[in-house]
Image (cartoon, grey):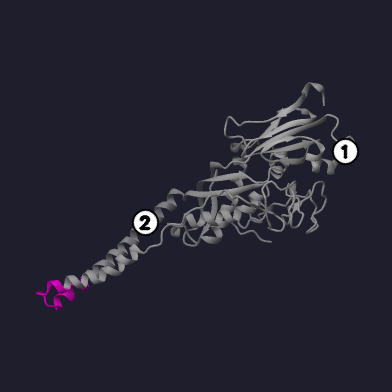
Amino acid sequence: MGTDNLVFLELIEWFDETGNELTHRIPEKGSGELKFGAQLIVRESQAAVLFYKGKAVDAFGPGRHTLKTGNIPVLTKLLSAPWGMNSPLRAEVYMVNLKVFTNLKWGTRDPVAFRDTALGLIRLRAHGIFNIRIVQPVLFINSLVGTMGMYSADEIGDYLKKVIVSRFNDHLGEHLDSIINLTGRYDELADGLQKRLQEDFSRFGLALSQIFITSITPPPEVQKAIDDKSRLEVFDDLDRLVKMKAAMAIEKASENTGDAGSGMGMGLGLMMPAMFAEMLKPGQKNHQGDAQKESKCPDCGNSIPNESKFCPLCGHQQVVFSQCANCGKNLPPNARFCSRCGHPADEKPATRLCKKCSTENLPGATFCNQCGEKLGD
């Protein structure tokens, strides 16, 4: 690397003026000459990740940090640096925004196939919004920023919505028999979809705070068929109403027409159960906030302080560099195989190929996005 791209780093800090940047590289191009004792200022809702020779070596929380050997134990462990940080170090720093990014839009660019039990194979369009935040800065940079060069919420949103649409298709196929029964189930489907996506997002160091489904729309001809069915159901209700009115008229004719008060009391008595049922309806559930004051060790589940780099119970390193593509276990730096399942650390999960239309789907997909066929083993 030439000296033209070299920047001398003595004071490192960053403020997001756009409000849309997930991460920011310092320097923006080339490498920086990181001096011994350089000052790193990390604001609240930020984290800093130090990179050396293209590899993340440590993460820093909010505060003012003096970069010395004792403050960078992971770097010392990785490099066993004989010079002990007494000489300048060429490195880069990625500043990560840990705030909740809201109102990110997702939707189907092309209609997805859905096998409806009442209407057959139809294609649906769906749209909604979702909120994300970065919970593992090093894993996020290693998995998305470092390999794909995504820095803003818009750039990462374009990729994540493809994951959402794929999982949405699976979730809809497993939990909805017909879109005729879709009314009133948006919240239920969104809650299930969020749980389904948690593992996908966690592999990128992200947490899916909330996801909402704003619309699920079939093609116009299918919508017309649903409207026609709704009209028929209205006619059925009218038929039952006419029969009920006729029965009430016969009952009234057989009674003593002079006792009007008794008839009114009977009517009120019939109405009371419905009135009480309406009053005792359970209220809508309250959505709790996303922020959690304490974090948990991803390996043993023990509660630990947010600034801890190692779990006091099991000793697991909290700075997540990468995760096993097979079982999701956090992997230490330079790992070649997973210590839990033995899976190669650099091997990515295979996509699922539809035998009917040969479309590639995400790993773990249940239904094909193109033809709606259930994917076999």
Q: Secondary structure at mark 2?
A: helix
Is 95 colored magenta in this rendering?
no
Pick the front one: 194 or 148:
194
> Which mark's residue is nearer the viewer, 1 or 2?
1
Q: Name the quadrant containing residue 59.
A: top right
Question: Marks 1 and 2, how far apart in space?
Answer: 75 Å
Residue 189 visible: yes
For disc 1, the neighbor class at 10 Å (few under 14, some 14 to 19, many from 20) is: few
Residue 347 on image: x %, y %: 77, 50
Is 252 colored magenta in this rendering?
yes
The residue to which callout 2 is attached is 228
Residue 81 badge: 1
**Left-right relation of 353 to 219:** right
Q: Is residue 122 above or below residue 30?
A: below
Residue depicted at x 54% and y 42%: 102
Q: Residue furthest right?
A: 82
For disc 2, the neighbor class at 10 Å (few under 14, some 14 to 19, many from 20) is: few
Residue 121 on image: x %, y %: 52, 56
Q: Is residue 301 above or below residue 208?
A: below
